[in-house]
Amino acid sequence: MVSSASSRCPHTRMLKEKTAFWSKAKACSNASSSPRFKSATDCSIRREVIGHVVAVTPASKQAGAKISLRFDTLADGKRRIPVVTNLRALATMMDVSEAQVPESGPDRGTSEYNWTTDQIGGEIAYHGLGAIVNGSHVVGYSEAGGALVQASSRPGTKYRGAADGNDQTQALWVFSSDACGLHDFPHVTLTHAGRTNPVGEITLKSSKGDINI
């Protein structure tokens, strides 16, 4: 999940010198090639978040791989709008998939309206009630294809809550209101989220081997 201009949940091929990076989601799908990449919608209104790989350090015997990238352009038809983004949360493809399956398991006989699903980060989405719940507190609204919640920080962590004092509800898709950092990437560290200099540059580093996201 990229703050400021959301690209949903990205996943990449093995990060080598010519990396392909793309978003693939219910509202944002399809891919591209390096060093440019795109995420595109299959809706009647087509928009793309475009970015590029800034630098790649291949894995060696002494250290793991590292990659730096930017999402810096919003394409709205023929318009190109510069944006500055940073990374709030990133989850595996399996986590994203599981967050879109009801707790009772896949069931074609049950309307999605009646589903209960688990957001990445632990909150629960009650589709029929239209509510996102953290413990006993309603923190947002379950909408078709995602969630609208007020971004928050989890007590005891270093991660931030609302961005730049923006306390309005945000579209966080399958992520909890307090989901931050990397989820289920045991050997990968987010070394730079892009909020400080160099602003907009996101850097991931592996403790060993290549990066698979």
Image (cartoon, rainbow, N blue to C red):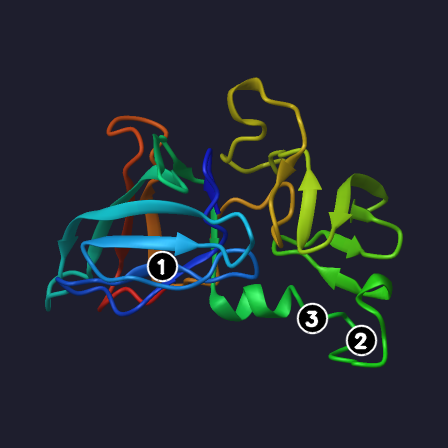
Q: Position of residue 100 (x, y in %)?
A: 66, 66
Q: Give the x, y percent position of residue 152.
A: 63, 33
Q: Which mark is residue 101?
A: 3
Is 130 in front, or is 118? 130
Q: Is residue 111 left or right of residue 29?
A: right
Q: Residue drawn 84% across and 70% down?
A: 111
Question: Residue 55 bears which disc, if any?
Answer: none
Q: Amino acid at mark 2?
A: Ser
Q: Which residue is mark 1?
A: 22
Q: Which residue is mark 2?
A: 104
Q: Nearer the viewer, residue 186 or 67?
A: 67
Q: Amino acid at mark 3?
A: Val
Q: Identify the amino acid type marked 1.
A: Trp
The residue that appears at 38% across and 35% down in the rendered structure is 85
CA–CA distance in space, label 2 to label 3: 8 Å
Front disc: 3 or 1: 1
Mark 1, other Cα within 10 Å: few <14 / some 14–19 / many ≥20: many
Up-down relation of residue 91 to residue 76 (above or below):
below
Left or right: 162 as drawn, with respect to 145: left
- Position in image of residue 117 (x %, y %): 74, 62
> What secondary structure is found at the residue carrying circle 2?
loop
Residue 85 higher or lower than 117, as above or below = above
Tag 3: Cα neighbours inside 10 Å, few (<14), some, or many (≥20)?
Answer: some
Disc 3 to disc 1, how far (Cα)?
A: 23 Å
Please indicate whether residue 147 sits to the left or right of residue 197 in the image.
Answer: right
